[in-house]
Image: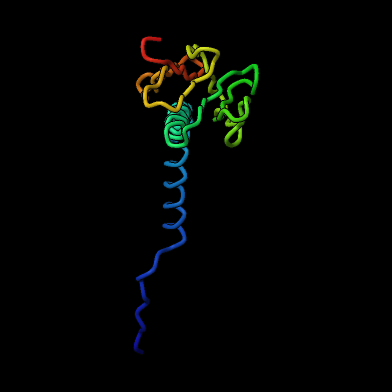
Amino acid sequence: MFMKSMNNGGVTLIELVVVFVIIAVLACLLVPNIGAWLPNYRLGGATRDIVSIMRTAQAKAVSGNTQFRVNLNDDEIGVNRYVLQYYAAAIWVSDGAVQRLPAGITIIANTFPGKYANFRTSIRIPHPLPEVSRCRTRKEPGKRSVSPRVPGG
């Protein structure tokens, strides 16, 4: 005659399905926004990478008493690639692997002489190191580009 009361502390299957449907709808709404943000993220990353390798070349040139350069010449290393090089025994030797820009990013308007950013062993650098603000980024429909420039170039 005594009735046992049921424990209503859990969640039902219907409640779980409703929560998963809400999460799925929100995920579908966010995915297109991430797709629009990704090209700008790649462009900023490529610009930071190029400036970083130029700062590395400058530091290595001064600390190692050796000439360094960042080779941006697409005729030598391929389109949209760059590599850090040092001068040894009358030839330029790569200091690391050739780096490739992310898909959809191109190097344009390279104003460095011979498409090389040269760094000598002296503190006075003939072509000052560009700051991030001096590396212009261009966004056109379907195109993203980095334009490394020397001051005044």
In this rendering, the answer to whether 115 lies above or below 48 is above
- Left or right: 78 as drawn, with respect to 12: right
Q: Position of residue 6 (x, y in %)?
A: 37, 77
- For this orientation, the residue located farthest to the bottom is 1
Residue drawn at (42%, 32%), measured in percent from left and top? 62
- Left or right: 97 as drawn, with respect to 7: right
In terms of depth relative to the viewer, which is nearer, 57 or 141? 57
In terms of depth relative to the viewer, which is nearer, 21 or 78? 78
Residue drawn at (49%, 20%), measured in percent from left and top? 117
Q: Position of residue 93 (x, y in %)?
A: 61, 30
Dividing the picture into quarters, in which one does residue 85 lie? top right
Residue drawn at (63%, 25%), measured in percent from left and top? 91
In terms of depth relative to the viewer, which is nearer, 83 or 67? 67
Report how many numbered discs are placed on residues in the image. Answer: 0
In the picture, the quarter occupied by the C terminus is: top left
Res 37 seen here: no
